[in-house]
Image (cartoon, coloured by chain):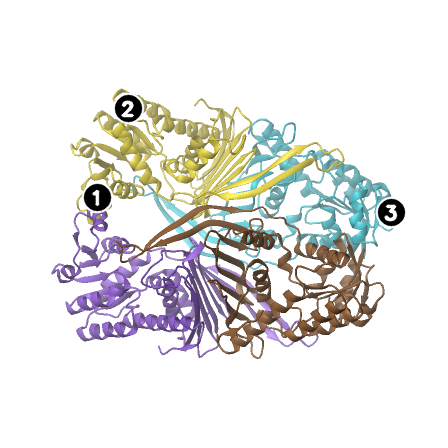
Chain colours: A purple, B brown, C cyan, D yellow
Amino acid sequence: MLRIGVIGYGYWGPNLVRNFMAAPGSSVVAVCDLQDERLSPLRKLYPSIKATKNPIELINDSTVDAVVIATPVSSHFELAMATLKAGKHVLVEKPLAANSADAAGLIEMAAKLKLVLMVDHTFVYTDAVRKMRKLIAKGDLGEIYYYDAVRVNLGLFQHDVNVIWDLAIHDLSIMDYVLPHRPVAISATGMSHVQGQPENVAYITLFFKEAEIAHVHVNWLTPVKVRHTLIGGSEKMILYDDLEPSEKLKVYDKGITVSPGPEDVYRMLVSYRSGDMYAPRLDNTEALQTEAIHFADCIEHGTRPETDGAAGLRMVKMIEAAEQSLRNRGALVELDL
Amino acid sequence: MLRIGVIGYGYWGPNLVRNFMAAPGSSVVAVCDLQDERLSPLRKLYPSIKATKNPIELINDSTVDAVVIATPVSSHFELAMATLKAGKHVLVEKPLAANSADAAGLIEMAAKLKLVLMVDHTFVYTDAVRKMRKLIAKGDLGEIYYYDAVRVNLGLFQHDVNVIWDLAIHDLSIMDYVLPHRPVAISATGMSHVQGQPENVAYITLFFKEAEIAHVHVNWLTPVKVRHTLIGGSEKMILYDDLEPSEKLKVYDKGITVSPGPEDVYRMLVSYRSGDMYAPRLDNTEALQTEAIHFADCIEHGTRPETDGAAGLRMVKMIEAAEQSLRNRGALVELDL
Amino acid sequence: MLRIGVIGYGYWGPNLVRNFMAAPGSSVVAVCDLQDERLSPLRKLYPSIKATKNPIELINDSTVDAVVIATPVSSHFELAMATLKAGKHVLVEKPLAANSADAAGLIEMAAKLKLVLMVDHTFVYTDAVRKMRKLIAKGDLGEIYYYDAVRVNLGLFQHDVNVIWDLAIHDLSIMDYVLPHRPVAISATGMSHVQGQPENVAYITLFFKEAEIAHVHVNWLTPVKVRHTLIGGSEKMILYDDLEPSEKLKVYDKGITVSPGPEDVYRMLVSYRSGDMYAPRLDNTEALQTEAIHFADCIEHGTRPETDGAAGLRMVKMIEAAEQSLRNRGALVELDL
Amino acid sequence: MLRIGVIGYGYWGPNLVRNFMAAPGSSVVAVCDLQDERLSPLRKLYPSIKATKNPIELINDSTVDAVVIATPVSSHFELAMATLKAGKHVLVEKPLAANSADAAGLIEMAAKLKLVLMVDHTFVYTDAVRKMRKLIAKGDLGEIYYYDAVRVNLGLFQHDVNVIWDLAIHDLSIMDYVLPHRPVAISATGMSHVQGQPENVAYITLFFKEAEIAHVHVNWLTPVKVRHTLIGGSEKMILYDDLEPSEKLKVYDKGITVSPGPEDVYRMLVSYRSGDMYAPRLDNTEALQTEAIHFADCIEHGTRPETDGAAGLRMVKMIEAAEQSLRNRGALVELDL
């Protein structure tokens, strides 16, 4: 039984505790938060869990085998590094760190100490995303044309990071997991509508060596919630709507065949292929449950997590490039992933 | 009774004929198309209408008072100019012309000859768009934060113009009509997935002097059809879904108030305003019907159309800038509208 | 070229004229309506069509080969009978007649004179309904459990017939076309909310000899429009939503297997089968177009229409039984179809 | 702090425990289930709670102030009666009892011992339902015309009660709470598709003294989940869709005004009123949380619960009448509520 310590009991922490409590291979033995008032509901719900305001105490607690960090981004590096140095495995809330240098540092230390370093790219552990990866991997979509993601809602404003760090990272990590190629350049635009606060709306275009284009639209300030991803291929196309209760994934046998239309000056000879649509059955297991089990499993067998430090570093690099381009109103920034 | 001649009986022509036939103040007396096979259904449906393959013959036909041009973009300028020079009013399918110089030329000629020059920016004549303009004009939305439009579907590929000329112009013309300000710069990205053909996907960001940002996403190659526009303001927000049968417009009393949160390092003090939503009743009159009546009305009273040559020119300028930016993968292009 | 005369140019007439004009094998030569103001738009749109206020004149017009009747139900029998006696084929708007005796009379006369008698059960000619019939016929759904239809909206009140005659007949005719069995008894309830007017809401349950049940809910007075049909089978289930622009038909590989659960007093051992869903590609041809071609085709080859007099009579019988049950607040009425 | 004991830890029990643990005024001290394997997840999640297989032990536990019963219907009466006789307050999962005599017996005993007897009609404690009651109470809808509810899905089959006891009771209790009048008669139809098992589909019509009609459609065997309620009034109409994440309630300013149309034999003079729609802001507090607080509150202040024994009895009476009518294929059954 893996004994987990969780640092940060704000918005995401309670979900982590619930899932590591429910997961067969693990249990939560200690939780830390700087604000005591946040710990009182924990004390009522789980009288058995140690509650502390001191993260170092938790990290060094001999009854803690591994630490899960769900604190503000700025503290990820310090807390994760301390955990590793204490010889313990660590699962870090996304993003892995506030900059690529810190992310690289964590990877290096985990490798050196042979400890599991995993990043909480939650959506990678949903059945919908895993199914998309499989479909693309076995070539069902043919050549990939585009990847278009929209993640907007009236969201929780954050004062330490902008909407790219908060929301776009979800789509970038899904894209990183399902697409066969990696982007080589980025152009991003965006804006802040709250004086002196980080950007609350952003548009990111990713370019590839291949005839592929990706785009991510994130916004903290929309009246409706949208979670829409379109993936277009030469053979099939996917609509992934994470808000659909059951049919989150729809695979369309749609596309075109183009040939010059001699007799028609106005429109070329395009034959549209429009076949059946199907929605594959999906397992509804909560992603965090799958992820908690995977973390315990990697620790037990010393295997590499699907969302390892390297994946975490790629996300941070993409976000750094996107921010740089955004500051220059769309100017292209090359990527080296 | 205004006697109309229609040039171009391909995809859009039949709608124009039907509406100008049905409109009280007008009737269609002649139709021209270069392809005779297109004219045979017309002959069966409307045996009374003159059908010809010669546009010049139609333009000079003494029974024709005004000409509607629904031909490929490349021929707009030549046919519209010939119509004006024949001393006749003209309604041109969007875009007004293939470049801003031609568009300016038409405006000049129409002004000189005191003839009505109107562009078919169809959506401007829908009740939904007119309602949005009213709401914004009387300040219901407060300060405008963003305008975000998505117009994607498995569309008719065109070999003479790309998806920006074909689809984005709809959103740019709606934006131009409802927003209080005009963009000052553009960054656009996009791609073609059909060898040697125009771009079939594009992303356009528009910058304003004010704290406003606009974005248009158009794509000819998606498995589902989407017509979504989000307009965010400091007081209210709008969702305009043109595919909704009845409630195309939803006005949300939603927003935020931000103040620094001392006690919370993780999240600032943001109070979310979430009130009622309402969907204003809309008149379902077909836009082309309203437009046909407006065209006849402008000719009768010598008034300026809501979608006049100047509006048509602004669209062409924006599209030219967008294409220039797209060719340079998002490089900023200044606008002078 | 079949020359059609259309009687009744109210709500449905214009659609009939437009489709018989467009259909390759037919053309409309004459239209009749008692109200002259209704004929003026026709005169403007189709100057070539004879417009008259006298139905008998149209029926006896030597240039008319077949007559389409789209008048109030009360006049269907008289006009259809006059048409048959004039030796002409007839297509009657649903319902075939105001009572089963009249319907039987028309069938008899058409048989005697060897003329085509067809009823306009429009939905039978949609690709969605034809596809459902095929799926059920080849056993894909397994044993049929239920057929549930909802057809509600803020509808056109009629003062001569109630909502069953107006709306339920659509669902009864679809059901009659796709189901393998025919109902043997009916229980119906409903109510009128307009003093002295026919029922505007009704609920109809249909019983079968087999373990099958059907239900139709119709309402003229709902704020939203719903066109929902659920068909449940032991192997597969169908959701048919006629308002869906493209995926009108969804076929679900869902169901249950039941076995007594020894260890569980609270819930039995039910294994739920939940596989993929798919939406078959559908042809979007307008139903009336297919129907117009079918009518001309039946006349040319002397074949029996898919919606012949017998089908029309079954609908009238079901509706008569439903009304009788409704008057007695759900009392069972046996059916003999 | 009210100390709760929960009997039954199957499907619903865990939700009850979670909510009574979280509610400020109460805490769960003991949980009982006949199946030990159900208690192990409880032991892992809440090591602090006493877990037992013996309901009598829990009822008599001196640390238990009140008991919540979430067992199969057949055991409700016996366990609730035992609880009352032990001098403790009781909250019974719906339905209150397996028949009206038992329900009446519990009411009598609770009254005699001055104990709180509450039924878990969960939906009554949702903000959407409470809002509907308010709108109707202040006359916004005008005269009520109809109440139409659909509650279908691929549901958990139960072997002890049919779909009316399991699902329709939700709609009957919502209707009972929001409508000004009570039904006077019932006609119901339905069927079982699993050999020797209770009905899995049912249609219930409820008649009123007033010009009002209600209908409930429930089904355990549909491929899609639907939670739709339409309430039509002379002034306004409501669509309540419980599956909508945010806009569960839509209020339509729609209706008709009817006057005889002299000049039109085909359709009477009906003027359709179609104004704005609005969706009132709703509080998203989990219903069980509100309910748990209400239960504790009623006990503390000795007040009568909104869903008291009398409400529970009315539900049981309606369901008994519906079953009797269903057995006779829709034959009318009078109601005395």
Callout 3 secondary element: loop
The residue located at (77%, 69%) in the rendering is B83
Label 1: element kind: helix
Q: Earlier in the sequence, mark 2 or mark 1?
A: 1
Q: Are marks 1 and 3 in contact (CB under 8 Å)?
A: no
Give the residue at x 76% y 45%.
C9
Q: Amino acid at mark 3?
A: Asp
Give the distance between the C-alpha atoms of the residues marked 2 and 1, in whole angstroms. 31 Å
For the residue marked with disc 1, what is the amino acid? Answer: Asp
Query: Which of C184 and C199 lies nearest the eye of the viewer?
Result: C199
Res D36 label = 1
Alpha carbons under labels 3 and 2: distance apart: 83 Å
Three-letter amino acid code at disc 2? Answer: Ala
Residue B238 image offset from top left, x and y in percent: 51, 53
Of tags 1 and 3, which is closer to the observer? 3
Quadrant location, the C terminus of chain A = bottom left
Q: Quadrant of the N terminus of chain A?
A: bottom left
The answer to which of D323 and B70 lies nearer the viewer is B70
Residue beneath label 3, please?
A: C61
Q: Same chain for the residues at labels 2 and 1, yes or no?
A: yes
The foreground one among A191 and A105 is A191
- Give the residue pinned by disc 2: D110
